[in-house]
Image (cartoon, grey):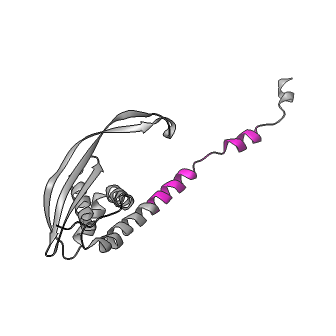
């Protein structure tokens, strides 16, 4: 079994995109995927708890924030001339999501890697960026400029005191 090597940054990026995609998006992409490889579950999908850490002020000391449910899956994807292993972790108890993300992760380690990058990762990443931009715009529309409010109310109130 010859697994294609991937750069750690690329692997993190694709894992993030697959984990942040919805299970329905991944299911639609998998349903439309021609010449699907044989999929064998190596581990899972199984749910468990992970410890969530945070940093004080975002950059300070680490502390344990609490526990979160996560689901992981590891699959072997096999085609006539290729075999690869894929692994995925998703937040929450979503076995179908973890399994589909692991399948696409496995395909990223196979001869179909370029096709997965173009038809799955790029499409999902574009959708996620559009959703994020929309959320930022919605959040930005609710921002109050307190400096302006303070300046408008900064009149000479000495007359009111008399």
Q: Residue 66 appears in which quarter of the rendering?
A: top left
Nearest the camera: 146 or 17? 17
Q: Which residues are magenta?
A: 130-153
Depicted 92 relative to depicted 60: above or below: below
What residue appears at the point 28 percent right and 61 percent down from the top-left corner? 24
> Which secondary structure type mostly characterizes the magenta part of the structure?
helix
Rendered location of residue 149, percent (x, y)? 71, 41
Quadrant where the C terminus is found in the figure: top right
**Does the segment drawn in magenta span residue 109?**
no
Depicted 87 relative to depicted 61: above or below: below
| Left or right placement of residue 78 versus residue 101 in this view | left
Nearest the camera: 104 or 129? 104
Q: Is residue 114 visible?
A: yes
Q: Is residue 93 visible?
A: no
Rendered location of residue 7, percent (x, y)? 35, 62
Rendered location of residue 40, percent (x, y)? 12, 61
| Left or right placement of residue 129 versus residue 35 in this view | right
What residue appears at the point 24 percent right and 56 percent down from the top-left corner? 87
Quadrant where the N terminus is found in the figure: bottom left
**Does the segment drawn in magenta span residue 138?**
yes
Rendered location of residue 75, percent (x, y)? 18, 59
Q: Residue 70 appears in which quarter of the rendering?
A: top left
């Amino acid at each position: 079994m010859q697994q294609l090597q991937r750069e750690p940054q690329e692997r993190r990026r694709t894992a993030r995109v697959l984990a942040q995609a919805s299970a329905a998006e991944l299911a639609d992409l998998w349903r439309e995927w021609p010449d699907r490889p044989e999929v064998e579950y190596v581990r899972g999908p199984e749910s468990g708890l992970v410890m969530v850490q945070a940093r004080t002020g975002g950059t300070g000391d680490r502390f344990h924030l609490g526990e979160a449910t996560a689901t992981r899956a590891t699959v072997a994807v096999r085609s006539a001339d290729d075999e690869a292993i894929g692994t995925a972790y998703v937040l929450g108890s979503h076995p179908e999501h973890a399994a589909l993300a692991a399948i696409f992760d496995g395909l990223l380690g196979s001869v179909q890697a370029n096709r997965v990058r173009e038809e799955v990762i790029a499409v999902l990443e574009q959708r996620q960026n559009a959703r994020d931009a929309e959320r930022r715009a919605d959040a930005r529309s609710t921002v109050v400029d307190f400096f302006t409010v303070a300046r408008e109310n900064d009149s000479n109130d000495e007359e009111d005191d008399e």
